[in-house]
Amino acid sequence: AESKLKDQARERYEELQPKYDHDTRVCVDNDADWDNHPGATNPYYWAGSGDFVLTSLQNVFDARGYPQIAQNYNTDDLIHCRLRKNGIKQVVLLPPCVTVHQNHRRINRVRANSRWIIDEHNFPKICDDPFAPLPTDMAL
């Protein structure tokens, strides 16, 4: 099992390294050239990304946290849209760093009185304007 995990990590690293080249040394020697890091313009990294976000408490307050909407699918990814809109750079933790993501069902639990959900069709528009009110937003 351990060698299989190491093989998967190596394969994932080889896939992601060209796309997030500035992040390849972060977990080795903190050599990320922070002043020139393209984390505000790189393609978003979405794979389980909203389940683990490491940032300051102030950044979370400034981003107004996760949207409080009547579904549980795609909402965690929206924190990245909000953080980036506020100028925070996304850094991808590549091996030898590891993050573990539980493989869980992706379902939408939508309230009976709400038929609006975030999906792949409206997500880009919402991500471009992440602070705009959403139809089922319950935030204060």
Image (spheres, rainbow, N blue to C red):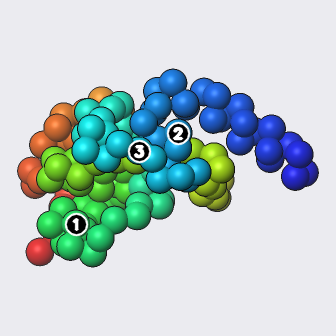
Q: Position of residue 48 (x, y in %)?
A: 51, 50
Task: Look at 51% across and 24% down and name the residue there.
Answer: 18
Q: Amino acid at mark 2?
A: Thr
| Up/down of 24 relative to 96, above or below | above
Name the residue carrying label 2: 24
What is the crowding at mark 3: few (fewer than 14 residues within 10 Å), some, or many (at least 20)? some
For residue 16, side relative to residue 31 (left or right)? right
For residue 87, side relative to residue 25 (left or right)? left
Which of these two is toward me, 113 or 107? 107
Task: Look at 72% across and 36% down and name the residue there.
Answer: 10
Name the residue carrying label 3: 32
Q: How many labels were placed on the picture?
A: 3
Q: Can residue 129 be seen in this snapshot? A: yes
What is the crowding at mark 2: few (fewer than 14 residues within 10 Å), some, or many (at least 20)? many
Q: Position of residue 35 (x, y in %)?
A: 25, 44
Q: Position of residue 42 (x, y in %)?
A: 33, 32
| Discs 2/1, front | 2
